[in-house]
Amino acid sequence: MMAAYKWHDTSAGINKAERRDMDLRSWLTRLNETGRLAVAKPGAALRYGVAGLANRLDGDKALVAPAPEGCAEGTVISGLLSRREWMAEALGIEPDQLLSEFQRAAARPVACQTLEAGPCQEVVHEGEAVDLTRMLPIPTHNEHDSGAYISAGLMICRDPRTGLQNVSIHRLQVSGPRELGALLLPRHTLAYFTAAEEAGQDLEVAIVIGASPACLLASQAIVPIDVDELEIASALGGAPLDVVRCKTKELFVPAQCEIVIEGRLLANTMRPEGPFGEFPQYYGARADRHVVEVDCVTTRQRPLFHTIVGGGLEHLILGGIPREATILNTIQSMFPSVSNVHLAPGGTCRYHLYVQMKPRQRGEVKNVIMAAFAAHYDIKQVVVVDEDVDIYDAEMVEWAVATRFQADTDLLVVAGSQGSKLDPSNDEGLGAKMGLDATVPVDAPAFRFKRISVPGEQEIDLSMALDQSGNPGAWMYQ
């Protein structure tokens, strides 16, 4: 008998009519209507061709690749959320609200709404009818990738002890018609799998492809193990997320998604997986890793296959925004003088953190730097700036370092600390961290760091002040 699913009942006061986020297809329509969607000619190569197009368009336009080579009925999409502004727009909020809204949603998740059926189950393939290599247009991205990968699939699993669900993204190598190789890092999915394996059982999983922007972002939340990220997606969307029960598994998935792969993480089974191009724009190495055996695939009619190219802006931003919200929560709990944080794209939205604050006393900035290192082990460089510096403008941050930082007094280095194992510059995750205090000293004379400004500059109406005659060089011939 299907076990009862345990949702947190926190939906009081939510009005479904007020839902503000977009599902995947609504977001694609918005991108198309606003000139931010490029459509490839039919026949784009799944091996490198789709990824190459997506990379060329990265941050400028999203990509739709209909009828790619060898898959006349399939459509691949990519680059849907490759700018922070796009993510905010898809959620129906302003860009400067992203972190506060994510903090709110993570702190107050909203129960999902279970439906009897949903679009994601319009077509059902079970047992021997399943062949991932034939059914879905799964791309190969980079030169030395071990093959085709599912890179934007939300893996949903259930704690065998509590019944609570978890949602996360794992790279999934297509190892055969019904087999996927999975990289499981030491996080919640692996904890659930370990509990099932110790009980001598496989772990049921559902891999969701083509989810809404809210679901994609929520999947990256850094929250306690007993928090279901689909409930965070509900909160981000402003109303309960519609979910349906899987056909063969005791799991619930977003009803409006495009594709659901139902299977099992096999106990006591490991097979080679990798290499695969990861977010630092290097390859994750080949090793023996976990295995998913696929039992069932359900889809919409003519489903869209979402792929995220490793190291591209979509990959970086989806991981970066939730980390920023968690890091800001952690630091602000100790230092309310901190107003904002940003994981810079130049630091792969993981390794380089910019912190904006108003220092109140000497030595406080160095404490903030140490708090930032403690907030997430991936961080290897922190730059702290004043509130007059735009932390989303890397050039302004560099200016602050150039004019407000001295290495002999404002530099903090921590050797032999934990970092990311995907950073090839460290020793299997052991490396150094560096913090830069690029703030104005609290006891500095006010005029010494007074920034120059031209009075009235921002109030100038250029349409009135400049010659609009169409012949701006005429003055040379007077």
Image: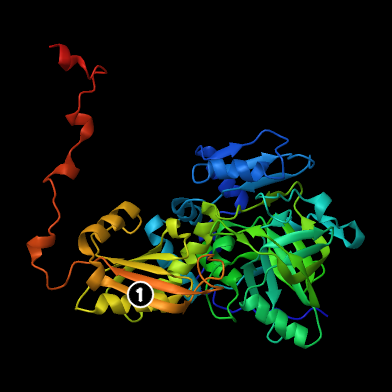
Task: State the image quarter where residue 282 is shown.
Answer: bottom right
Q: Residues within 10 Å of mark 1 (few under 14, many from 20)?
A: few
Q: Position of residue 98 (x, y in %)?
A: 43, 61
As drawn, 119 above or below 410? above
Residue 115: in sight, yes or no? no
Q: Is residue 288 left or right of residue 438?
A: right
The N terminus appears in which quarter of the rendering? bottom right
Name the residue rendered at 24%, 71% in the picture.
408
Quarter holding residue 171: bottom right
> The disc labelled 1 sits on which kind of residue?
Val
Instruction: Decide if residue 269 is on the left or right side of residue 387.
Output: right
The residue beneath circle 1 is 413
Give coordinates of residue 61: x percent, y percent. 53, 42
Q: Quarter holding the C terminus?
A: top left
Q: Tell me: residue 314, above or below residue 267.
A: above
Q: Position of residue 80 (x, y in %)?
A: 56, 49
Given residues 176 and 36, the one toward you in this image is: 176
Residue 191 or 384: which is nearer the viewer? 384
Query: Element type at marker 1?
Result: strand
Q: Quadrant of residue 23?
A: bottom right
Viewer-nearest residue: 64 or 423:
423
